[in-house]
Image (spheres, rainbow, N blue to C red):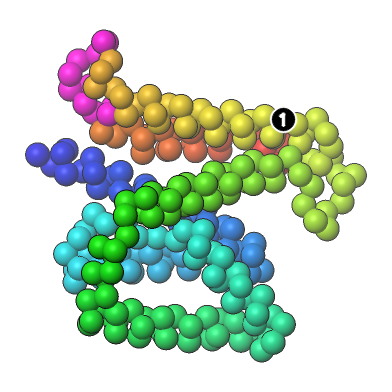
Amino acid sequence: MWLGILAPTAYVFFASALPVIAFGEQLSRETDGSLSTSETLASTAICGVIHSIFGGQPLLILGVAEPTIIMYTYLYNFAKHSVGKELYLAWAGWVCVWTALMLFILAIFNACTIITRFTRVAGELFGMLITVLFIQEAIKDVVSVISIPTGENASDEKYQFHWLYTNGLLAVIFSFGLLITALKSRKARSWRYGSGLFRSFIADYGVPMMVVVWTALSYSIPSQFMA
């Protein structure tokens, strides 16, 4: 019984944590470290616990997405050129306070019923937008591996072509390796080999296992090859 509960829990955990880590890293770059992965992880955890208690939906996926990053990036750029970078967090905090107030008002008047005016096409288009943004961020991360960061010395050994090529090739192998093995593991119940219990276990826990395995594999590469 507990294995059946643990499987969706592990899946939702990784579905929530991985985007938070990825977009937290992007947020750190866009805001010059004012907000980073630590803040996105903490906020996602706190909001998830609160929502699971008061919202009655413990398996709801909460987290950071690309539209959130875009909003905070615009706030940072505005603060940098007007009130100053040192007041960015205060500025963003007040924006969140007013946003929360507006959401409370919308909830009180049951404004969510407006969703009945939209067709499924609108929801699918928004889902496609999020998917495209995820793919875009993944491609940007892979490209960044083979690029020389701004301000770095291009003559350093780790930025020579053969090392950049090696790092880029490994990044592509790890990316597609994780994608393919995760997709294959989800179809484990239709495999013709292995016992039924083994196939069910792989189908339930294959995705988080592949994330752990490929992440461990990337860290097992010597540092001189993964500069």
Q: Quadrant of residue 55?
A: bottom left
Farthest residue, direction left: 1
For the point 29% across and 63% down, the residue is 117
Farthest residue, direction bottom: 83
For the point 60% across and 82% down, the residue is 88
Say if 219 sits above or below 173 in the image. below
Q: Quadrant of the C terminus?
A: top right
Residue 166, horizontal then vertical, whole percent: 72, 30
Callout 1: SS: helix
Residue 90 can be seen in this image: yes
Say if 3 sits above or below 86 in the image. above
Residue 136, horizontal then vertical, whole percent: 58, 46
Magenta residue span: 192-203
The one of 6 and 221 positioned closer to us in this rendering: 6
Q: Quadrant of the N terminus?
A: top left
Report the magenta stretch's main SS: helix
Residue 138, horizontal then vertical, whole percent: 57, 44
Q: Is residue 52 left or right of residue 152?
A: left
For the point 29% across and 45% down, the residue is 10
Q: Amino acid at mark 1?
A: Thr
Residue 225, horizontal then vertical, whole percent: 69, 33
Say if 5 sits above or below 196 in the image. below
The one of 6 and 64 positioned closer to us in this rendering: 64
Q: Is residue 131 left or right of residue 111?
A: right
Query: Badge 1 is on which residue?
Result: 166
